[in-house]
Amino acid sequence: MRYLIASLLLVAAQPICARDYADESLPDPRQEAQAVALMDTLRCVVCQGQPISGSNADLARDMRRLVRERIERGDRPEAVRAWLVSRYGQWISLKPEMNEMTAPLWAVPLLALLGAAMLYVRRAKRKAR
């Protein structure tokens, strides 16, 4: 009976003994560098303009914990990013990849620059006459 009680207490104490990786660095410096580099490129869903590495929001804290835990388990940063993008969409990435959904985001500034250059050339030709 004592062993059963001791076992139950030991199992119940596990969450207390678990490491909280939200604000604590990983023991392996290489893994921590990978985690921080990834966190710097992920947008905080609450703050919307900050990376999760610099946000004080509870959700950003949970995401930091998740990133560190998955990298410590051996997941590659690209796999963690892909999982987060599948869950939250491309919007979570501060550096979105070029695809059919984000193509307008990349094309509009280039088209605006091209249009401005064409207007400048046209006005310069009119002034020259």
Image: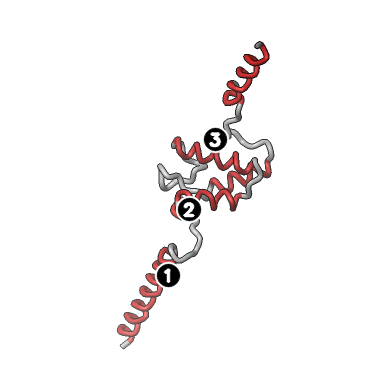
| Amino acid at circle 3 | Ala
Q: Nearer the viewer, residue 39 or 77?
A: 77
Q: Give the residue furthest to the top.
A: 2
Q: Which residue is mark 1?
A: 110
Residue 117 location in percent, x, y?
39, 75
Q: Which residue is mark 2?
A: 94
Going from N to C along the chain, the mark reached first, 2 or 1, is 2
Going from N to C along the chain, the mark reached first, 2 or 3, is 3
Label 2 environment density (alpha carbons within 10 Å; few <14, some 14–19, many ≥20): some
Image disc number at residue 22: 3
Q: Left or right? Give the position of 99 relative to 117.
A: right
Image quarter of the C terminus: bottom left
Residue at position x 62%, y 14% in the image: 5
Residue 28 location in percent, x, y?
69, 39
| Amino acid at circle 2 | Leu
Q: Left or right? Give the position of 67 relative to 91.
A: right
Label 3 environment density (alpha carbons within 10 Å; few <14, some 14–19, many ≥20): some
Q: Nearer the viewer, residue 75 or 12?
A: 12
Residue at position x 42%, y 69% in the image: 107
Residue at position x 36%, y 74% in the image: 115
